Amino acid sequence: MQSKIKYSVVVPVYNEEGNVAKLHAEIVAEMNKLKSSYEIIFVNDASIDGTLEVLKRLSPITVVDLRKNSGQSSAMDAGIKQASGEILITMDGDGQNDPSDISKLLEKMNQGFDVVCGWRKNRQDSFEKRFVSRGANFFRKFLVDDGVHDAGCSLRVYKKECFFDLDLYGEMHRMIPALMRWRGFKITELMVNHRPRKSGLTKYNWSRTFKGFTDMLGIWFWRKYETRPLHLFGSLGVVMMTVSLVGVLVLAVARLFFGYLLSNKIWPMVFLVGFLFGFQVLSTGILADLVIKNREKKSYYNVRQVINR
């Protein structure tokens, strides 16, 4: 009978040919110090350089090869679903996260936490990337305050149960601390080392910033109305319909008893449009409620192959 694996290290990579071998060696050295069973999972997010060929030469390793580029969150999700360890360790594949911090994060977890997030207090990134990150952090704290300083740091440790019945996609990897906190898990953070990139190009661009912001809005809505969208759309629709009906009643009283002319007034059209729009919003809430109650799980990526060495 195969013994249980204690730790699973999950590393999503895209076009990191020059970084993965060194990073893998560092992870192996660090995990060997823990004196417990472990597995190392690299998720190749359809790299178009030689990343996959380099990964195939490494050992011990499990390579999850995605059929098409699906983004960091989906690649991380694929690795997490492949993992069988009791404790999950995630990190970036660009070599900027330092594997020597893993033991410190695990020690912090042993103090009674379910999730320990890395905090890159002294980031080794460009000014542009740090500036945009600060702006994103401001909006994140306003919409989804997760209590951590650095939601963009992928170096984290989790208990496996944190990801039961949870799918990641889009830019949701940045929202994981918020999702964990909302689900009732105990979260903390720890300052970690952040190293300059030695090889390859950053995958950061402005489109990821906008995608992250829209995902943030989606997570905010999901948190409040995941199981009850009718409460939002239904309430708004009923209010609009009620206001419109009251307005029509007032106009009718004014016309019948006070001789108020309506032929040259815009108010009848305003209240009619308001009533119809309110009805549409209410209908949207009902349909969204039905979709939520009958939804099926959807995969946001496609695995080409899984290689074990």
Image (tube, grey):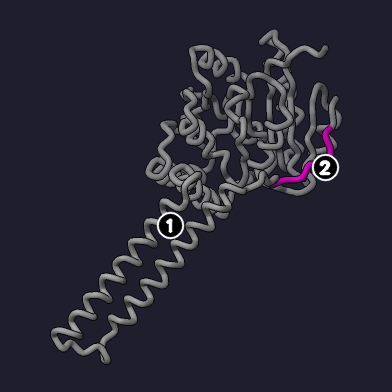
- The residue where tag 2 is placed is 304
Q: Is residue 285 left or right of residue 12?
A: left
Q: Residue 17 at x, y = what percent?
A: 76, 38
Q: Tags 2 and 1 in contact by the CB under 8 Å rule? A: no
| Viewer-side residue, 117 vs 221 | 221
Q: Is residue 206 left or right of residue 92?
A: left
Residue furthest top as drawn? 35
Q: Is residue 220 magenta?
A: no
Q: Residue 31 at x, y = what percent?
A: 69, 16
- The residue range painted magenta reads 300-306
Q: Residue 84 at x, y = what percent?
A: 72, 23
- In primary-sequence order, the first of circles 2 and 1 is 1
Q: Is residue 302 magenta?
A: yes
**Residue type (three-letter) at the residue carrying disc 1:** Phe
Residue furthest bottom as drawn? 263
Front: mark 2 or 1: 1
- The residue where tag 1 is placed is 233
Residue at 46%, 33% in the rendered image: 182
Give the numbered dot on residue 127: none
- Note whether residue 18 is visible: yes
Q: Secondary structure at mark 2?
A: strand
| Viewer-side residue, 262 vs 210 | 262
Q: Is residue 275 left or right of residue 258?
A: right
Q: Residues within 10 Å of mark 1 (few under 14, many from 20)?
A: many
Query: How many numbered badges does the structure rendering display?
Result: 2
> In this rendering, is residue 79 above or below 110?
below
Quadrant of residue 308 in the image? top right
Residue at 68%, 15% in the rendered image: 6
Q: Residues within 10 Å of mark 2 (few under 14, many from 20)?
A: few
**Residue type (three-letter) at the residue carrying disc 2:** Arg
Residue furthest front as drawn? 256
